[in-house]
């Protein structure tokens, strides 16, 4: 077996596979950018045209006696369910992060107040104050768009009063003047909800005037119009004139909501909602931020052979400086700890990820392993399978073992093959002890002069088989 110790992040690898030790920093940690230039999701002209088109459609429905809303049947404002859901084939634990809420401060620029009196919103130098909720898909937003991974659903029942489709949906800039793909729903109280930035060709097959039920499919999260990452822009207007929604509201209830007194959600989600979106394993380093709008290459894999490379990632949202994220890897018996460590969060961000790899030569126990993370009060486990890559003539060497472990002085080697070389590496990958015996083979070694700590012993047979075993000196 051509087993090797890949030196990529070796210091982190070896320390994290000790008992309750802390590794170095992850190889990659970053959150997706969104609208860095702080531009509106619609030009003023586009917004004016959209409102006018909605009014015209509503009036035409009224004239044709097809308008569902009427003053006589006006009900209370709707209570929304969450307007996005993952497709049936998406196995991530969760799939989104909120980047922007409605801006309640009419001043500009950089005069920001969201419903919770925070600044999780934006305005522009031209006087636009963000008017909706931006729900960004995470992880792999472009891959999710490509695969129809996140569906937009009706947050409340109502009537379709406007649809636009057929527009380019891989926008990478807020500077474009291309319109967005959008569906607009009017509710029984006359209010309207705008679902913007949809994927081209994904909008519902229903037409203006058709009714939709709560939770019904409307489209796929895309990046059409003035957008630089796939996300849903959810914007709501309250009715006050002739059944046409004209007063912006914020569906969230909060101390600094100056638009409406109560929540429009059936169950309002927390302002900050720390969560693990995905715990994954990969056959190669995932491409998380390729040039826009190139789809990410996740390189997802749950099946490995013992001499494959292993990569581990955890994708989180709403992390805050000082938070603790815990990681651990369990062997196939699901109780034997292979390694565990903690990371103290250094950056507050609505989305982030942690990557560890590449590991080769360490996962030699055949069976189902568990890669686990704990954050935000939740523990999410991901299992992956390891099978032997040994040929028939190598199987016996796979059973080679050492004892005692931990050791004090002498280490015994148990193997049906002739072991001719033994090398001990320290936590930096430096060889600190070596012995060779091509004639008689090696059945014991005496590295008693080593300091207490963790090492790796690499054994080689006379037929060039290799095996690496973690070693503890007490």
Image (cartoon, rainbow, N blue to C red):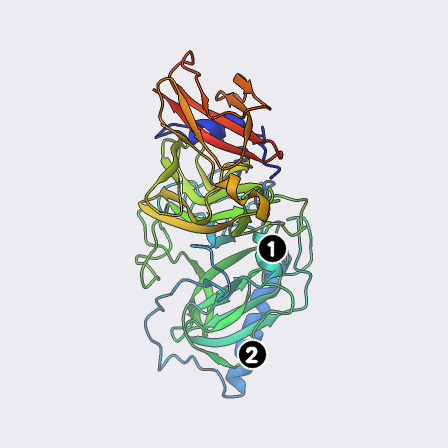
Q: Position of residue 68 (x, y in %)?
A: 44, 82
Which numbered tag is attached to residue 248? Answer: none
Q: Which residue was labeled with disc 1? A: 143
Q: Judge the density around disc 1: few (<14), some (14-19), many (≥20) Cα neighbours within 10 Å.
A: many
Residue sitting at the far bottom: 65
* Distance between the alpha carbons at the discs numbered 2 and 1: 30 Å
Circle 2/circle 1 CB separation < 8 Å: no
Question: Element at badge 1?
Answer: helix
Classify mark 2: helix, strand or loop: loop
Residue sitting at x 39%, y 24%: 472
State which quadrant residue 75 falls in: bottom left
Work out whether residue 272 or residue 390 is closer to the camera in this orientation and state it: 390
Between residues 320 and 180, which one lies in front from this camera angle? Answer: 320
Q: Residue furthest top?
A: 449
What is the quadrant of the C terminus in the image? top left
In the rendered image, which quarter contains the N terminus?
Answer: top right
Residue 270 percent location from the top left of the image: 34, 50
Instruction: Specify whether 448 is left or right of 39.
Output: left
**Where does the image place residue 223, in percent across and percent down from the top left?**
61, 56
Number of callouts in the render?
2
Q: Nearer the viewer, residue 278 or 301?
A: 301
Instruction: Tell me the number on the disc at residue 208.
Output: 2
Percent of width and height locating residue 379:
34, 47
In the rendered view, tell whether residue 222 sits above or below residue 174: below
Seen in the picture, residue 370 relative to 27 is either above or below; the reply is below
Query: Quick check: can you spot residue 143?
Result: yes
Q: In the rendered view, tell whether residue 267 sits above or below residue 420.
A: below
What residue is drawn where x is 40% and y is 28%?
22
In this view, the mark in front (2 or 1): 1
Nearer to me, 241 or 150: 150
- Tell which circle, 2 or 1, labels the residue nearer the N-terminal end: 1
Dot 2 alpha-carbon crowd within 10 angstroms: few under 14, some 14 to 19, many 20 or more: some
């Amino acid at each position: 077996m051509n087993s090797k110790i890949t030196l990529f992040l070796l210091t982190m690898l070896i320390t994290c596979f000790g008992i309750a030790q802390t590794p170095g920093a992850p190889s990659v940690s970053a959150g997706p950018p969104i609208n860095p230039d702080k531009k509106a999701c619609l030009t003023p002209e586009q917004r004016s045209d959209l409102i006018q088109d909605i009014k015209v459609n509503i009036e035409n429905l009224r004239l044709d006696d097809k308008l569902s809303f009427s003053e006589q049947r006006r009900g209370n404002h709707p209570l929304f369910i969450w307007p996005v859901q993952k497709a049936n084939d998406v196995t991530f634990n969760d799939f989104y992060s909120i980047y922007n809420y409605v801006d309640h401060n009419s001043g500009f620029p950089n005069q920001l107040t969201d419903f919770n009196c925070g600044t999780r919103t934006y305005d522009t130098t031209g006087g636009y104050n963000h008017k909706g909720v931006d729900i960004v898909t995470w992880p792999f937003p472009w891959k999710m768009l490509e695969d129809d991974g996140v569906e937009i659903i009706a947050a409340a029942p109502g009537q379709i009063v406007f649809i636009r489709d057929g527009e380019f949906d891989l926008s990478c800039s807020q500077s474009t003047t291309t319109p967005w793909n959008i569906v607009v729903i009017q509710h029984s109280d006359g209010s309207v909800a705008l679902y913007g930035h949809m994927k081209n060709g994904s909008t519902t097959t229903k037409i203006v005037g058709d009714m939709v039920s709560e939770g019904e499919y409307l489209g796929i999260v895309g990046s059409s119009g003035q957008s630089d990452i796939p996300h849903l822009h959810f914007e709501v207007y309250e009715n006050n004139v002739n059944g046409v929604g004209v007063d912006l509201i914020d569906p969230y209830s909060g101390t600094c909501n100056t638009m409406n007194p109560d929540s429009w959600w059936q169950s309002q989600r927390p302002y900050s909602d720390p969560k693990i979106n995905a715990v994954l394993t990969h056959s190669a380093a995932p491409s998380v931020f390729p040039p826009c709008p190139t789809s990410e290459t996740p390189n997802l894999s749950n099946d490995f052979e013992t001499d494959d490379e292993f990569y581990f990632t955890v994708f989180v949202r709403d992390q805050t400086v000082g938070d603790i994220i815990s990681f651990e890897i369990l062997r196939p018996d699901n109780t034997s700890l292979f390694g565990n460590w903690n990371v103290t969060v250094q950056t507050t961000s609505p989305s982030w990820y942690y990557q560890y790899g590449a590991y080769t030569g360490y996962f030699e126990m055949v069976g189902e392993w568990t890669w686990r993370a704990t954050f935000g009060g939740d523990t999410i486990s991901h299992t992956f399978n390891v099978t032997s890559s040994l040929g028939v003539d190598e199987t016996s060497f796979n059973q080679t073992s050492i004892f005692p472990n931990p050791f004090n002085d002498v280490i015994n080697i148990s193997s049906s093959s002739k072991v001719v070389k033994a090398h001990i590496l320290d936590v930096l990958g430096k060889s600190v002890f070596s012995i060779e015996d091509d004639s008689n083979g090696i059945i014991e070694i005496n590295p008693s002069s080593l300091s207490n700590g963790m090492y790796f012993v690499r054994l080689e047979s006379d037929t060039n088989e290799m095996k690496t075993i973690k070693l503890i000196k007490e």
